[in-house]
Amino acid sequence: MVASVLKTQSFIIFLILFFITIITPFSRLTVAYGYSELFGKYISPSSLGLKREKLSHLHFYLHDVLSGKNVTGIRVVDGKPSTNRSSQFIFGDVYVIDDPLTIEPDINSKTVGKAQGTYTVASQGELSLLMVTNFAFTEGKYNGSTLSVLGRNEVLSTVREMPIVGGSGVFRFARGYAQVRTQSINQARAIVEYNVFVFHYR
């Protein structure tokens, strides 16, 4: 009788350990995948109305005015105390910009948008900027759409490239690059030519 009871208890303990060892991990896995499904899942591009990807070319001029009338860029962080400055641009300087974008080098030509964001003097050896900027367009089919630039801008190089890392509106899911050439630059202002090549869906 005692032996039978012991066998029964041993069997029950075995079943309990079995369920703890085998069933519990599966339960946790199910819960984990359940939460993941709620948090994120794969969807079809067509469900967002996305069709064939397009490649667009945009051409415009950026005007960065640092002094005089109608200033569009201001220094908000000084890399050095202003009394010791030997140049307009010092390592560590941070500027905030609201620069007009025009179709011609003349700042009075048609405006197609604004460059809004910041740039930081990020090199101690040459005039190299870290650009964190949105191009906010106001003209034609691009009105209300934006492109985002994040990259290195070596200002005195003849030609440089910066990546397009995203966008909104017409430029949702945008990717591409901006090819940049300086038209003119001095202590007061810079005129910069942009050729932007960007893939997008709309």
Image: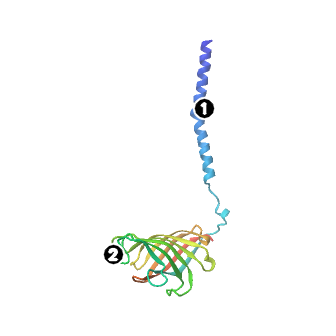
| Figure quadrant of residue 91 | bottom left
The residue that label 2 is drawn on is 83
Crowd band around label 1 with a 10 angstrom C-alpha radius: few (<14), some (14–19), many (20+): few
Q: Identify which residue is drawn at 39% across, 82% down.
A: 187
Q: Earlier in the sequence, mark 1 or mark 2?
A: 1
Query: In the displayed structure, does residue 142 sit left or right of residue 82?
Result: right
Q: Identify which residue is drawn at 51% across, 86% down.
A: 107
Counting from the top left corner in percent of width and height, residue 55 is at 57, 74
Disc 1 marks a residue whose amino acid type is: Phe
Of residues 67 and 121, which is closer to you in this image?
Answer: 67
Disc 2 marks a residue whose amino acid type is: Thr
The residue that label 1 is drawn on is 19
Counting from the top left corner in percent of width and height, residue 194 is at 49, 79
The image's colouring method is rainbow
| Between marks 1 and 2 in the image, the one whose residue lies nearer the viewer | 2
| Figure quadrant of residue 200 | bottom right
Q: CA distance from mark 1 to mark 2?
A: 75 Å
Counting from the top left corner in percent of width and height, residue 129 is at 41, 72
Mark 1 vs 2: CB contact within 8 A: no
